[in-house]
Amino acid sequence: MKTEDLKALGLTDEQVQRVFAMNGEEMNGLKANVDTLKAERDAARTQLADANKKLEGYDPEWKTKADQARQQAEQQVAEMKAGYAATSAASSLKFTSDSAKKAFLADLNAKKLPLQDDGTLLGFDDYVASYKKTDPGAFAPDGGLPRVSGSATGTPATPTAKDQANAALRAAFGHR
């Protein structure tokens, strides 16, 4: 902000001086705030350095242990992400039973396919194709499982009393 800019707005010299005075007070307050924050930051850095020195005195290998713990945590998170991706990918597949699905997921997780950036497993389709070849009974056919409606094949020679009663009930309720 310049004096000429304020005068161009139609302010008098006295008004321009007031604007600069108010701006100066505000800027001084902000500078003091910045100085306070810098001092707090420097104090925190000093405390951190002192704490690190004390930790080295108590346990010289604390940095190594902290790095190992971080790596283990990252590995667990990666495994969880891969597990969720496997479950999500397998949800589109039709299995013959829950046991078949559990076995498939266990084998898939043991395979440890790499997780892509988009959250999918690299090589999942190829794995499914090879799994279908090795264990075709684990997957339901595309049309679903065949429906079993009777205990014997063919038609009975004469309707049984049960068949006649069922037919009478269907007819009474208007179903054929």
Image: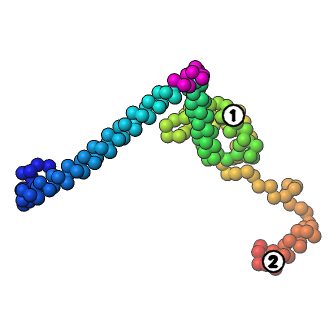
Rounded to the nearest whole Å, what is the CA distance between mark 2 and mark 1? Answer: 52 Å
The local crowd at label 1, few if under 14, some if 14 to 19, many if 20 or more residues have their Cα within 10 Å, is few
Q: Which residue is mark 1?
A: 107
Task: State the residue in front, 150 or 126.
Answer: 126
Q: Which residue is mark 2?
A: 171
- Which residue appears at 6% of the width and 56% of the height? 13
Q: Position of residue 42 (x, y in %)?
A: 39, 33
Q: Which tag, 2 or 1, sits closer to the chain's start?
A: 1
Q: Position of residue 131 (x, y in %)?
A: 67, 35
Task: State the residue in front, 75 or 146.
Answer: 75
- Which residue appears at 15% of the width and 52% of the height? 20
Q: Is residue 70 visible?
A: yes
Magenta stretch holds residue 37: no
Is 176 left or right of 161, judged from the image as shown? left
Task: State the residue in front, 7 or 20.
Answer: 20
Q: Amino acid at mark 2?
A: Ala
Q: Which residues are magenta?
A: 53-61
Q: Is residue 113 visible?
A: no
Query: Residue 156 sits in which quadrant?
Result: bottom right
Above or below, comparing residue 30 to residue 152 in the picture: above
Magenta stretch holds residue 58: yes
Q: Position of residue 4 (x, y in %)?
A: 6, 51
- Which residue appears at 30% of the width and 44% of the height? 32
Residue farthest top in this picture:
60
Above or below, comparing residue 135 to residue 10 in the picture: above
Q: Amino acid at mark 1?
A: Asp
Using the image, tell me which numbered label, if any, was put on residue 55. none
Q: Position of residue 17 (x, y in %)?
A: 11, 54
